Amino acid sequence: MTDSNPNHSPRIERHLERVFRDADEVGLSLVRDVLDEPPGRWYGQLVVNTYDSLSDQQDPETIIPAAGAIELLRGYVRLRSRLFITHTDEHVHSPTMDPTPALLAGDYLYTAAFSSLGSITGTGSSDCFDTLTTVLETITEAFARIYTSAGSSDDEQTKFLDETTGSLGEAAAALGATLAGFDDPTRTHCERLGRKLSIARQIHFILDVEANEAMVIPPSFDERQFRMHAERSRNDAAQAFDTLSETADVTRLRAFADVTVTGHD
């Protein structure tokens, strides 16, 4: 495991700045807006912290593009959520968006996410593309289902979170594990960890912070059901940590989770 600073946000930020400049040049200022809120680059940091916990080498040229890719995809997901979301009396939401520039910005974001992976060479690069493709398909299907149904049950609401923010966290951890040279079963445990941490974190933003800081928000939800789902997710993440600790030093990854997720509630 490396001894690098566990806060990798500045390095990810520098990588994304090139994307911002290109988007500004073609008049897509919405790309910068959606990627700047909220700050922190949590998903990108999850990629790098997973990699650092499993790898004996530090290779920023490989891992930072992967971290950038997941942040670009996060921006795409956030933008899609803002397009679809309905206003409620209980929660503050972003203003209604002009769909044309939002759709163009969304296309730019997911295209840039795959382009970011293009600079990765060697073992695991094709698996990274497969991971991003799979999570994009899952998220797209989740949005289509939740916003075209006449109504949604509690189970469908939590499933929506699992398939959007949960899938993105799973993909982030999978990218880190893949580039560290790990496959099943270690990668499976990392994927479970990333999914559950991401769900718990997202529910925190929906219920306990301002809703407009959340990446996705279902059109309706039951707060009690969500709190129970967050607690189950934290428990599952703790079990995944215990399993991973049997074969890897996950001290840094656990510290990252304690600061950014499990210490919230």
Image (cartoon, rainbow, N blue to C red):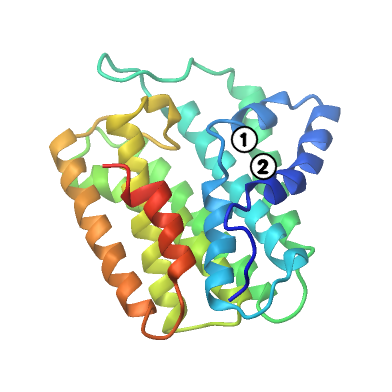
Q: On the image, numbered disc 1 is attached to which residue?
A: 35
* CB atoms of marks 1 and 2 within 8 Å: yes
Can you tell which quarter of the image residue 48 is in?
bottom right
> The disc labelled 2 sits on which kind of residue?
Leu
Q: Which quadrant of the figure has residue 226?
A: top left
Rounded to the nearest angstrom, the CA distance separating label 1 from label 2 is 9 Å
Q: Residue at x 32, y 42 (%)?
A: 264
Name the residue carrying label 2: 109
Seen at 57% across and 67% down, the residue is: 175
Question: Is residue 240 left or right of 37 when viewed as pictured?
Answer: left
| Above/below status of 226 relative to 48 | above
Of residues 40 and 146, the one drawn nearer to the viewer in this rendering: 40
Residue found farthest to the left: 224
x and y percentages locating residue 77 in the rendered image: 52, 41
**Residue 161 spot, x, y in % from top left:** 34, 46
**x, y (%) of residue 204?**
31, 39
Give the mark nearest the N terminus, 1 or 2: 1
Q: Position of residue 152 (x, y in %)?
A: 22, 38
Instruction: Establish if 47 lies above or below 216.
Output: below
